[in-house]
Image (cartoon, helix red, strand yellow):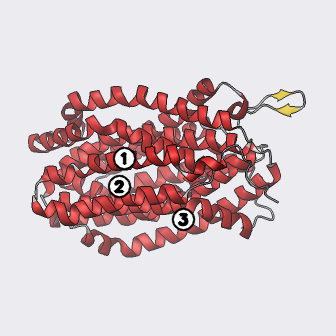
């Protein structure tokens, strides 16, 4: 966290500075980090699509919903550490924050190893469950097993980056992701067209780049002099802090996994239309992710600013932070939506020159683009409410509005009219449902009673 000494105390820009200025300074590195992360994911897709083929492109994309099912659950659990650390730093409980960081890091390492082993073992069964087209299966299995092998690095990086962001430091996670993105791009070009390793080479490049980012973030936590310093000597997992991290993070982990599970149903529906549909959906998804990285930056900003100001007991700054975040969200998403509506098909040419695939990608983006703005209320309100430590009820809202509704759509509505469009439109429908419920809960939910009351002191 960037701090300067003021009359013997630390100046915290999140709890004391101009909200508009400090939020944009905090948010920009997160957005750039996400864009660079998307850049190397996009390079993966470009290299795979152009040098191997559309079957490989569809196969790699088909693995995404599956890998996220397991990895995002643990990353969601890790977000409990981000919320807790943010509150403790806002309340100036530095000793407690340090113990929370030690607990969170140990948990990320052990949990990441478990997810890696589980993913490698379950990969064949998970692919069969998503109806991956036979011509894509071998590509998908190879990519998935290698990718899961590096899951521990993904979890460790996300845990460490979340801790830094909770303290207001979003710049160094951006630098780390910039370095790892460069590594991934270079290795993609070396392993796939250079050495001819196919999708296995693309997966290996991703794993190595994730290892680099994990090493950099752990090194920062070990060497910093801030209250969130990681100390390996005498390091142990504190049961009390682990319980609090799990209490805060479990609903978010469930939410992330349920998102991924519902997406598996949708991917299964897409795959039923063949490899061209899978490739078109994949190309659109790579461009669609740009929107979601902006949304994620807004959600993280809301959680951090609300969390620290809630920890400081400043009700006024809590709500001002939310309002500023909403304003920035509209300024960002409306131009992006217009670009994807008018130029989505053209941008999809980065991944393939197949005209059928391009038409399908453009079709998907034209269905998505008019509805991106409704996701603002879901993600910003959810992130803000979670910043106060209220994570269970937002999970329930997401569960019913998104996951259950998508499952109902795919199991009961889609069979009545089996078209590609009926699969794709499930996303805007569920975005709108979730936004409506979050607006209601934000206005009238029990979480408002907590604002202005400092969280319990951590001993």
Measured as percent of width and height from the top left, residue 411 is found at: 21, 66
> On residue 253, which mark appears?
none
Which of discs 3 and 2 lies nearer the camera? The answer is 3
Q: Which residue is mark 3?
A: 112
Left or right: where does residue 453 sit relative to residue 58?
A: right
| Residue at screen point 79% across, 55% down | 457
Measured as percent of width and height from the top left, residue 219 is found at: 67, 49
| Residue at screen point 47% across, 68% down | 116
Mark 1 or mark 2, earlier in chain:
1
Say whether residue 424 is visible.
yes
Q: Secondary structure at mark 1?
A: helix
On-image quarter of the C terminus? bottom right
Pointer 3 local density, CA inside 10 Å: few below 14, some 14–19, many at least 20: many
| Residue at screen point 23% across, 31% down | 341
On-image quarter of the N terminus? top right
> On residue 188, which mark appears?
1
Measured as percent of width and height from the top left, residue 5 is found at: 84, 29
Which of discs 3 and 1 lies nearer the camera? The answer is 3
| Residue at screen point 31% across, 41% down | 288
Q: Do callouts 1 and 2 mark residues in contact (Cβ within 8 Å)?
A: yes
Left or right: where does residue 68 sit relative to residue 165?
A: left
Q: Which residue is mark 2?
A: 201
């Amino acid at each position: 966290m960037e701090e300067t000494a003021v009359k013997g105390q630390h100046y915290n820009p999140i709890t004391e500075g101009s909200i508009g200025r400090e939020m944009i300074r905090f948010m920009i590195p997160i957005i750039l980090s996400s864009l660079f992360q998307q850049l190397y994911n996009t390079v993966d897709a470009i290299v795979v699509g152009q040098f191997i083929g559309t079957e490989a492109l569809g196969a790699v994309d088909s693995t995404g919903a599956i890998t996220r099912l397991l990895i995002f659950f643990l990353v969601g659990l890790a977000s409990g550490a981000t919320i807790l650390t943010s509150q403790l730093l806002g309340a100036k409980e530095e000793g407690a924050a340090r113990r929370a960081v030690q607990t969170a890091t140990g948990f990320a390492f052990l949990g990441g190893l478990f997810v890696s082993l589980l993913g490698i073992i379950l990969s064949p069964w998970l692919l069969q469950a998503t109806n991956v087209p036979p011509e894509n299966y071998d590509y998908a299995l190879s990519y998935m097993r290698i990718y899961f092998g590096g899951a521990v690095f993904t979890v460790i990086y996300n845990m460490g980056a979340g801790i830094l962001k909770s303290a207001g430091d979003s710049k160094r996670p951006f630098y780390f992701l910039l370095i790892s993105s460069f590594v991934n791009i270079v290795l993609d070009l070396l392993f796939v067209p250079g050495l001819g390793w196919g999708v296995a080479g693309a997966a290996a490049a991703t794993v190595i780049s994730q290892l680099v980012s994990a090493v950099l973030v752990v090194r920062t936590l070990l060497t910093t002099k801030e209250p969130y310093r990681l100390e390996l000597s005498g390091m142990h997992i504190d049961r009390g802090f682990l319980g609090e991290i799990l209490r805060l993070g479990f609903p978010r982990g469930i939410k992330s996994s349920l998102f991924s599970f519902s997406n598996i149903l949708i991917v299964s529906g897409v795959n039923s239309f063949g490899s061209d549909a899978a490739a078109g959906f994949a190309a659109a998804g790579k461009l669609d992710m740009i929107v979601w990285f902006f949304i994620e930056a807004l959600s993280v900003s809301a959680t951090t600013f609300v969390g620290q100001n809630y920890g400081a007991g400043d009700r006024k700054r809590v709500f001002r932070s939310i309002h500023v975040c909403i304003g920035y969200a509209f300024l960002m998403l409306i131009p992006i939506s217009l670009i994807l509506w008018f130029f989505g098909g053209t941008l999809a040419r980065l991944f393939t020159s197949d005209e059928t695939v391009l038409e399908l990608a453009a079709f998907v983006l034209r269905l998505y683009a008019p509805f991106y703005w409704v996701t603002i209320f879901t993600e910003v309100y959810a992130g803000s409410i979670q910043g106060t430590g209220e994570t269970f009820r937002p999970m329930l809202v997401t569960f019913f509005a998104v996951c259950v509704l998508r499952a109902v759509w795919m199991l009961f509505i889609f069979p009545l009219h089996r078209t590609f469009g009926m699969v794709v439109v499930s996303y805007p429908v569920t975005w709108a449902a979730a936004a409506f419920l979050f607006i209601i809960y934000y206005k009238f939910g029990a979480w408002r009673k907590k604002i202005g009351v400092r969280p319990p002191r951590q001993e």
